Amino acid sequence: MKKLLFLLLLLVSCFSFSQEEENIKSHEIKINAFNAIIFKSVDFSYEYLIDSESSVGVSVFFNLHDPEEAFLEDGPVYNEEFALTPYYRHFFSNKYAWGFFLEAFGMYNVQKDFDGYYDNNLDRNVLTEGTSNNVALGIALGGKFVSKKGFAFEFLGGLGRNLSQSNDAIGTELVPRIAASLGYRF
């Protein structure tokens, strides 16, 4: 009888523990609305919540701006054509992966630069192109707020330094990390 009671209690406690684990949503997908509106670029992110205070994730950035036209326009433009950014976040709140956070990130980025001039002999504009593959490290500060149904809003701002550049004439010394993202926690 004691063995049966012990087995029943063990089974109930395992079931209760597994129910708690199922209720914790530990995955997020996001899109950076700020970059889409201001910089004509898309930035998608996936984040895994390790526990209530920390998470890891990765962002993939694609610049949709025509680089050949960038030197002619007055608006803000990213030098990066592509960026892959893994990150780690530490949250400073009593809620589960919610509130203000500090982020450490690494970034592989590809920067393109077009320079143009008018050639009188050819009677047309001439473009010269250069590319630099870079690796950067940086930090960012931000905040994340999640509704009870899992809709998420986050903002962050930070800066990284390119530590390795394949073309020093093209690659910038600093890379920005700016976001106002909308997403879903599941």
Image (spheres, grey):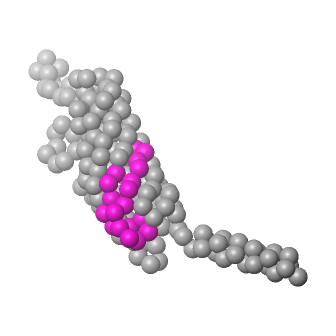
Q: Looking at the picture, tell me which residue is in the foreground, 72 or 22.
A: 22
Q: Residue furthest front?
A: 2
In this view, 133 is above or below 82 = above
Residue 172 appears in view:
yes
Identified at 29% across, 22% down, the residue is 167
Q: Nearer the viewer, residue 181 or 66?
A: 181
107 drawn magenta: no
The x and y percentages for residue 170 are 25, 27
Tell me which secondary structure the magenta stretch mostly adopts.
strand
Q: Give the percent coordinates (x, y) of residue 81.
A: 34, 39
94 inside magenta stretch: yes
Residue 132 in sight from this viewpoint? no
Residue 27 position, x and y percent, is 51, 62
User: Which residue occupies the foreground of this view, 173 or 22?
Assistant: 22
Outermost top residue = 121
Q: Residue 72 occupies which quadrant of the picture? A: top left
In x, y percent, where is residue 64?
34, 46
Q: Is residue 122 left or right of residue 1?
A: left
Return the residue found at the far right. 1
| The magenta segment | 85-103
Q: Is residue 172 above or below residue 94?
A: above
Q: Residue visible at 42% across and 65% down?
A: 97
Q: Residue at x 46, y 73 (%)?
A: 150
Q: Look at 20% across and 28% down and name the residue there.
A: 115
In this rendering, position of residue 45 left or right of residue 138: right
Quadrant of the rendered structure where residue 35 is? bottom left
Quadrant of the image for the N terminus?
bottom right
